[in-house]
Image (cartoon, rainbow, N blue to C red):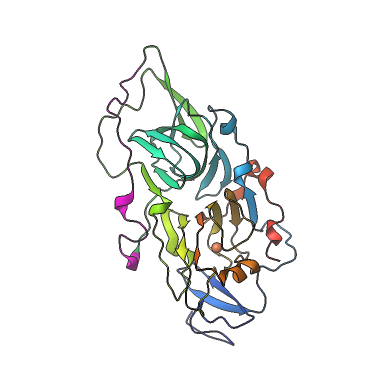
Amino acid sequence: MYLLKKGTAPNQAHVGIPKELYEEEHGRHGFVGPASHLYRRHPPTAWVRIEGPLRPRAFSCATLTTPDQRSADASPVEILHSLDVRVFLSRRAGSMPYFVRNADGDEVYFVHEGRGTFETDYGVLPYEPGDYVVIPKGTTYRIVVESGPSLFLIAESPEPVELPQRGLLGHHALFDRGVLTAPELKPDAGGDGEKGREWEVRIKRDGQYTRVVYPFCPLDVVGWKGDLWVAKLNVRDFRPVTSPGYHLPPSVHATFQAGGLLVSTFAPRPLETDPQALRVPFYHRNMDYDEVLFYHRGNFFSRAGIQPGALTLHPQGIHHGPQPQAVEASKTKTHTDEVAVMLESRRPLTVLPALEPVELKDYATSWK
Ligand SMILES: [Fe+2]
């Protein structure tokens, strides 16, 4: 199509929205494809009722009891899946007595709570809240809990996890590759074998585990070189871009990409200072991605009443945007102090039964 305008519409999107009207962005390819801005008389989220499967949902992950919380021998529980990503929750209280190797995909761990280490083929990497730990498909590793319990949100992608193109922002925007941390090899790796002891590696393929048992510690690497390794990024090293005069779309916070999966970080940042500029996310119906937001810490500026450890799901096709209270509150705020992680899946996500017990039932009508 070509650029066209009908009726009342400002020439600059997200700026000078006419009084009493609500701006919606209707676009393709996330926030980078063709788009129109619709100026409506009512917030498109002010429905009274939804019937059918397509509805915004919210879950309190921090209150879900997981098998690995009760038993160190257990595995993370799968909570959501699509053809682009499988999402797992782990609330591990004790160190893994086994090693694991995921032959289904790369994994991105986000650490919500707890401290400890990842012991991997590439060495030992400490973790703390706010860390992303990216584990390439096929890496052997285990988690040692030091102070816990830990809470990890884990995204598994069949496609390799990569850093998105930074385009005009330059290579060093959002974070410099130099801030990615690699594990350190232990000088005695694999050499501390006790006679008669066995080490178990659980290899996951097609969701099924195969147990391989060694008479020595399988983490016996004493050197490596290459450009495939376990990498860590903490959200405090994520440097968001903002503009004083223009509300940037969420796509500017893209942190990792893996085929049809996008992982983005909402980090503390100043709000727009131009009084004409929109200061909260615009309404949209994310036509090309199902959108999951996991709230890590802070005050969540686009909605009230959300707790750290909560997860929301906004499927393709149905609107979302700020609650009316958040629009009001934004008028006096100068910055956001939220940290949240967004997972976007090109293909539709299914909520698995394991997550349903912690659903926040009135979420779908919380914009009223
Ligand atoms: Fe969104």
Residue 30 seen in the figure: no
Residue 191, located in which quarter of the rendered image?
A: top left
For the C terminus, the quadrant is bottom right
- Residue 240, image x, y percentages: 41, 62
Q: In this picture, is 364 found above or below 271?
A: above
Residue 31 seen in the figure: yes
Is residue 168 on the magenta stretch? yes
Outermost residue, bottom side: 7
Residue 292, located in which quarter of the rendered image?
A: bottom right
Left or right: 59 in relation to 36: right
- Residue 335, image x, y percentages: 49, 65
Q: Quadrant of ligand 1?
A: bottom right
- Residue 174, image x, y percentages: 37, 59
Residue pictured at 46% horizontal, 26% vertical: 98
Outermost residue, top side: 196
Q: Of residues 330 and 152, which is closer to you in this image?
A: 330
Q: In this picture, is 192 found above or below 181?
A: above
Is residue 251 on the magenta stretch? no
- Specify the principal SS of the magenta part: loop
- Residue 148, image x, y percentages: 51, 35
Residue 197, located in which quarter of the rendered image?
A: top left
The image shows a total of numbered marks equal to: 0
Left or right: 165 in relation to 56: left
| Range of magenta residues | 167-193
Residue pictured at 63% horizontal, 42% vertical: 63
Q: In this picture, is 350 found above or below 43?
A: above
Residue pictured at 36% horizontal, 41% vertical: 230
Q: In this picture, is 319 found above or below 194?
A: below
